[in-house]
Amino acid sequence: MSATVQQCTACSSVMFPFRLFCPYCGHWEFADHQVDDAVVEETTTLADGAVIATVVCGAGARLIARIVGGEVSQGDKVALSNEPDREPGVFAYIPFTPESRY
Ligand SMILES: [Zn+2]
């Protein structure tokens, strides 16, 4: 399982949420990029109990994801998924659909 994020075709920067312009080089063309896992940098527990995490993927991008299926701590490696109902285990959910690109 992996998650789809956006990669700039000019400078190869990886980002999520999707952008209209690359914040690093100003380019406007992107390709989908698959990321399998990431390291938890910081977590925040919302009032409803949901846990949101900033995770850093291997390409160096910081992504915002929802932690599903259990608890994580800073420094933990978590799998990434675009499917909120993936089972089993703990993973970081990134809400990507092809329609959500722009
Ligand atoms: Zn770029």
Image: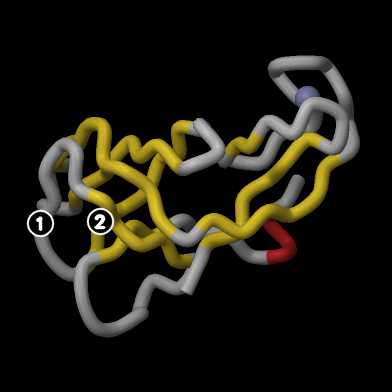
Residue under the image location 73 percent in, 51 percent down: 101
User: Which scheme is used to colour this image of the protein?
Assistant: secondary structure
The secondary structure type at the circle numbered 1 is loop
Q: Which residue is under mark 2? A: 67
Residue under the image location 74 percent in, 54 percent down: 32
Residue 17: where, in percent of width, then height?
58, 40
Q: Is residue 60 above or below residue 88?
A: above
Number of residue marks: 2
Residue under the image location 18 percent in, 70 percent down: 69
Identify residue type, mark 2.
Ile
Q: Which residue is under mark 1? A: 71
Residue reaching furthest to the bottom:
87
Q: Are marks 1 and 2 in contact (CB under 8 Å)?
A: yes
Q: Is residue 53 above or below residue 2?
A: above
The secondary structure type at the circle numbered 2 is strand
**15 left or right of 72?**
right
**49 left or right of 102?**
left
Residue 49: where, in percent of width, then height?
11, 52
